[in-house]
Image: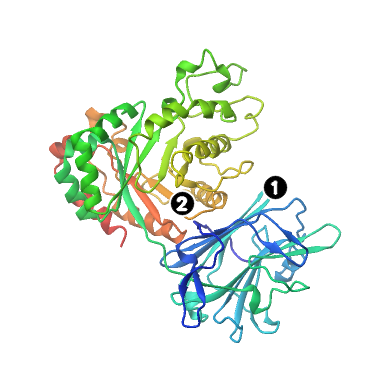
Amino acid sequence: MRQFFHLLPLVFCALSFQGCQSSDDTQFTDIGQGFETHALYAPWSGLENDTRFCCHSTANHFHFSFEVNDSTLTLTTPYTCEDDVKPEDRVEIFFCSDKEMKEPYYGAEMDPNGHTLDYEARFYRKSNFDWNFSTLQLHTALTPTGYRVGGSIARSELQALGMDLEKGFWMGVFQADFKPNGDVVWYSLKPTDDAKPDFHQPKVLFPCRMTPKAERRGVVVYPTDIASAGIEEWKKRIDLSGINLIGIHAATFMEPIDSLEVFMKSELGQQFLQMCQERHVDVEYELHALQYLLPRSLAEPHPEYFMMDADGHRAPRYNACFSSDEAIEAMRPQLEKLLTWLHPTTHRYYLWPDDVTGMTCHCEQCENLSASEQSLLFENKLLELLRQYDPEATLAHIAYHQTLEAPLKVKASEGIFLEFAPIKRDYTQPLAPEEDMALNDNLLAFPGYSHHVLEYWLDESMFSSWKRDALVEWPDNSERCASDIHHYRELGATSITTFATWLNQAYIDQYGNTDDIFRHYGQSYR
């Protein structure tokens, strides 16, 4: 039985098969940069479905994910061997080095419980079922509407099997849907006009290549951290660390969004943006924004906009009724105001719920949803509104505190990406098993290519227990940071940042310059 594993990100690109052109006019789609499709086809049955397949590549691994809606799950019980996958619902991937299948090709058929039937084959249907992928790792989950399968394969193994990842190879993506009456519907990513289903033929493979996706690495800071240390200090920090992304943070209880607006419109704020542009550093904004977007003054005329507590009373102090379309629409004026000055260069938005625990809604529509599912319900609707102003917008779902659990009942809309922020972890140890499992489950729940990790390796505010007048010296966790980054990369992460708050002039005055901190952070990515 194959061992389950962690899995990570995926990708975005329409099924156009456009990309690099070979000498024989073959167009190779670069799936490594990010590929996503929302339908597979069963031309033999005159059907199509809404299976979501995503994939991308990091420097060392090919990462993939399937999300399948299937109301008639058919599984073998008890499972005893690989052959038990054959009569089951499953998804499949083929790899072949040439478009005519003259060379061997390699298949992996994966069921909803993480069992795999993999093999080496030669055209036509000469299969060696004793052969197995040596680096295939899977993570799976059953959902109320079907199942999710995700995993990774080492690039080095695909290359050893003859795939020219940079120039091009051929891949097939398939699904088998078994029905209770014994019928089977066979789906393929690439349609064909054949009369009978057959995956083991060249015409259902598509040409692709696999260039590793560029990596984002960065820090998240308060505007006062920038103002206190100054532009020249931040130039040095960027040069020492090699970061290419800075997130600017605001939260209503610490530094309100209004103060961030004042800073960004100031001469210093504009100089900072100019400096980042000159150094090719992207700028994003990470905000606990819900109270800003939905003013509490609306509670009296519209109590239905706000969360209902466990006693059945509307409580406007925090968050909102996440299922309320009217509450989302009521956010429009404040969102319009925000977007007059907030312009992330990546078009990635972070408009988080309030930074409190236990503040979920108990109304009839929300009460059976977890905190993460309620947040995702809100984010799906907010993104729809946001894209009326920025058509390229994507929006973060933060897995943090009570939203660390992956959503099952609510599905992420296209454009919602995972932001994994394990604030409660122990920084003397790797991620705890339950945190690692939460990460893997979330990676399955948020197919796409922009999955993002927000860590706390340099968070002086956290290490100082959020007491500005009691700064402690940064605990050198460089080894833990490097190990964590390696772990996240192995799972497919291509966007990793850390809070680096309160490493300001007050810290420098007390403990000396921060050169080694930022130098070590940059070295952690090597």
**Image position of 57 with respect to 313: above or below:** below
Which residue extends farthest bottom?
A: 102
Which residue is more in the foreground, 293 or 64?
293
Q: Secondary structure at mark 1?
A: loop
- Give the residue number, with chain letter if any, for mark 1: 145
x 67%, y 57%: residue: 112
Q: Are marks 2 and 1 in contact (CB under 8 Å)?
A: no
* Residue type at tag 1: Thr
**Image position of 41 with respect to 409: above or below:** below
Can you tell which quarter of the image residue 406 is in?
Answer: top right
Instruction: State which tag comes first along the sequence, 2 or 1.
Output: 1
x 37%, y 58%: residue: 215
Q: Residue 488: image x %, image y %?
A: 42, 56
Q: Residue 38: image x %, image y %?
A: 61, 55
- Give the residue number, with chain letter if any, for mark 2: 451
Location of the N terminus by quadrant is bottom right
Which residue is more in the foreground, 450 or 347?
347
The answer to whether residue 359 is visible is no
The answer to whether residue 522 is visible is yes
